[in-house]
Amino acid sequence: MPKLLSDARIAQYREEGYLAPIRIMDEAAALALRAELETVEARMGGPLRGDLRHKAHLLFPFLADLVRHPALLDAVEDVLGPDLLCWTSNFFIKEAANPAFVSWHQDSTYWGLSAPEVASAWVALTPSTEANGAMAVIPGSHKSDQIAHRDTFDRHNLLTRGQEVAVAVDETKAVPLILKPGEMSLHHVRLVHGSPPNPSQGRRIGFAIRYIPPHIRQLEGEDSATLVRGIDRFRHFAPEPRPETEMAPEMLTLHKQIAERSARILYRGTGVASFNDPQAVRG
Ligand SMILES: O=C(O)CCC(=O)C(=O)O
């Protein structure tokens, strides 16, 4: 018996590799999360940069709650099963009238995970529309195997290496995922997706949370993850604690170690050492 999605929607995810929109909280709750983020940004003197865009759920209790949000996890459970690890999370923030974009890519390319059983929940904290650079997907493309990618290191690309699929994408098939605050999309790790710049006058803020079942392994080194539902019978990933307070010193130290280790996996073979490296695409 599915927890949140209908059988038809689960079948659609399997067939097309994505689902949207899925409402997981009301608009006011999502706008409150946005306000929390923007309070943090105001304190820091600007948008989150470098390491802080990755696994911020290990530093901020409001994001630790979001990766464990019951309705969100119900939807993820419906596609991945009852035991769930949050492997990572990434802020995808496009500032107003800004050239930042995301090239067509498959998430699986550099993640080093043993099988394509990975689902991303992309939670909208602002509207995400064609007018502000919504993510678009190529339905059914998750059924292809891993496609070759080339790294561009384009400075406006929000991906770690500015990677893009090395084959032509039929953009006439692209479907934009239009979301209101408090809605999310789900997408499969092999789905080809990307997004254009945001020419609008407002920010577009998405928080992408990556979930795996615990039998998945990291093939490229040591890795850690957060058990958010069920049981981890495999222990392939070192368990991560939940932050009790914002940016606690011991969590900052741990987060730095984890970010350095993740960067070694994601940037392997490029000479880039960390998400804070001036050569990293994402700053
Ligand atoms: O936020 C975007 O526009 C793209 C997000 C993305 O590539 C992802 O969540 O995997």
Image: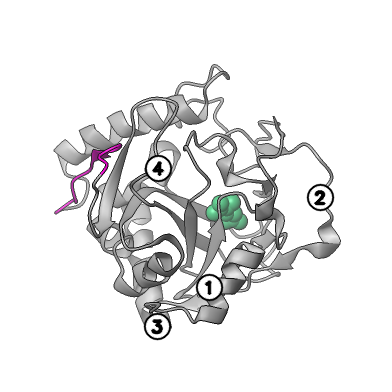
- Label 4: how many residues lie within 10 Å, few (<14), some (14-19) or many (20+)? some
Return the x and y of residue 17 as percentages of the image width and height.
62, 61
Q: Upstream in the sequence, badge 4 or badge 3?
A: 3
Q: Secondary structure at mark 3?
A: loop
> Amino acid under label 2?
Val
* Magenta residues (range): 234-244
Report whether residue 277 is seen.
yes
Kindly report the distance in space between the C-alpha atoms of the residues bearing marks 4 and 3: 33 Å
Question: Which residue is painted at 81% across and 63% down in the image?
Answer: 173
Looking at the rendered structure, the kind of residue marked 4 is: Ile
Q: Image point 54% across, 30% down: which residue?
A: 280
* Magenta stretch contains residue 241: yes
N-term mark: 4 or 1? 1
What is the distance, in whole Å, between disc 4 and disc 1 at their CAs?
Answer: 21 Å
- Residue 10: numbered disc: 1
Q: Is residue 218 above or below residue 68?
A: above
Look at discs 4 and 3 and give the one toward the viewer.
4
Q: Is mark 4 within 8 Å of ligand 1?
A: no
**For mark 2, what is the residue?**
169
- Write down the residue under mark 3: 26
Residue at left 22%, top 43%?
Answer: 240
The spot of residue 183 in percent (x, y) is: 48, 75
| Residue 216 numbered tag | 4
Does residue 113 show up magenta in the picture?
Answer: no
Residue sitting at x 84%, y 45%: 168
Whole-number angstrom distance, CA of label 1 to CA of label 3: 22 Å
